[in-house]
Amino acid sequence: MAYRYSFEDLLALLHGHAPLQAGAVVLHRRRVEHGHLSVGLKIHSLDDGRQFSALVEGLGGAERILEANYYKQSCASLCLVLPPVGSARAAILLLESIENFIGSTLFGNPKIQIQVCSPGRLDARRSALLAIGFYLGSDTLRRYTLRELATSFTGHHHYPRGRRLVLYDAEGDFERNFDWWGKDSGKHRFVEPQLPFANGRTDLLMGSGSRLDIENINLLATLLVHAQYQGYWEECGAQFQEEMEALLERHILNGLIEAPWVRTDDPTSDDDDGFFAALQELVAYAFEESVRIKKQGGLFPRWKEIPSRSSGGILQEMQSLLQKYRAELISKSRLLDQEDLA
Amino acid sequence: MIRAHQPGSEPIDIPETVPNPVVVPKPTPTPTEPAPKEPARTPEKVP
């Protein structure tokens, strides 16, 4: 990801307005939590982007900071690329520091699109699961238009990315210096000081997003990337994949996985309409489910206490799945720490 | 807001976003200064 300023310069600027958050970002910048993936962020401003002027000037000016980066959402006035950090927590703190600096909100702002970047290119099937998992697990159900998903790389000559929620990188700069949890032949954890890929990312252009969205995308990407690249969480990732595919099958939505959720090198993936039809089907199903829950909520106000099962509805099932794997990774990671101390 | 409209019918407003009803919103965390460290205690000497 191209950003032409130093992380230290950014933090120095932010520190003046948000000393606590900026200080916490410094502490957590390289710290990988529970073997999750590092997190990169891009902020697309859909209005005139005036609120970013002081920040951009402080970092070296628009020509150096913004115009060096050809990529942005088609309707955006600017795309600010942030340096990658070790965890979702640090990414959230970084965005909160920027909110304080610019004096306007980034989370839940319809004029701001947040793109979350994860290291490692997921294959087409896992990219589909990333997008569907993000959508169903989000705290907001969104309706998209294809136009919102257009970027300056939609029809790029060398790196055509189409109009999608999930986008591969364009082989730009890549920061490898984040811990990667691998495993030896005895399935014991070993921590590599670098990511196992020299390049390659899977990004999610989530639109107006929340803190939970960043946490969810980081969890989903960790599980799916570890399943694909035989990381320490490979088994958890494969099991998650199975459970998510079973979830979609129960709701007769398993056909959605076959749609081209990401534009790959395969020419048959060049089908924005095929992707959008699948997305619309998912959106319609989720909206219908939300209406059903709201109606049921009036009759059964304590519905949240009903244990999750196949009839719990797709939204509830997705939440349970995310909660289960979030808890599993944390508890296993804490166990490893205890073993290391013993 | 997306408007679906056919001639002769009332326009229907379709919301672009709705809250996911199964997600319990978390309060926005407010950073606090770290608690001061407790002073190190030296064990009393046993006579």
Image (cartoon, coloured by chain):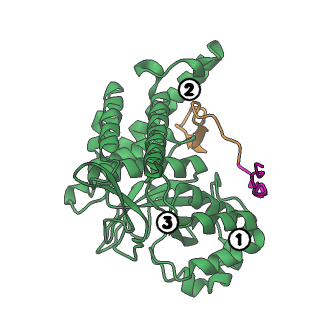
Residue ranking furthest to the front: B47
Q: Position of residue A169 (x, y in %)?
A: 37, 67
Query: Residue A73: which disc?
Result: 3
Type of amino acid under label 3: Gln
Depth order, front residue of A146/A249: A249
| Residue count near mark 2 (Cα–Cα under 10 Å), binned few <14, some 14–19, many ≥20 | few
Q: How far is disc 2 from disc 3 in space, using C-alphas?
A: 31 Å
Q: Is residue B34 left or right of residue A319?
A: right
Whether the magenta-drawn stretch holds residue B42 is answered as yes
Q: Quadrant of the N terminus of chain A?
A: bottom left
Q: Secondary structure at mark 3?
A: loop
Q: What residue sits right under mark 2 in the picture?
A: A291
Which is nearer the N-term, disc 1 or disc 2?
Answer: 1
Figure quadrant of residue A49: bottom right
Region rendered in magenta = B29-47
Which is nearer the N-term, disc 3 or disc 1?
Answer: 1
Q: How far is disc 1 from disc 2 in space, using C-alphas?
A: 37 Å
* Display colour for chain B: orange
Whether the magenta-drawn stretch holds residue A233 is answered as no
| Residue visible at 65% across and 38% down in the picture | B25
Query: Residue A19: which disc?
Result: none
Q: Secondary structure at mark 2?
A: helix
Q: What residue sits right under mark 1 in the picture?
A: A51
Q: How far is disc 3 from disc 1 in space, using C-alphas?
A: 18 Å
* Display colour for chain A: green
The chain letter for the residue carrying disc 3 is A
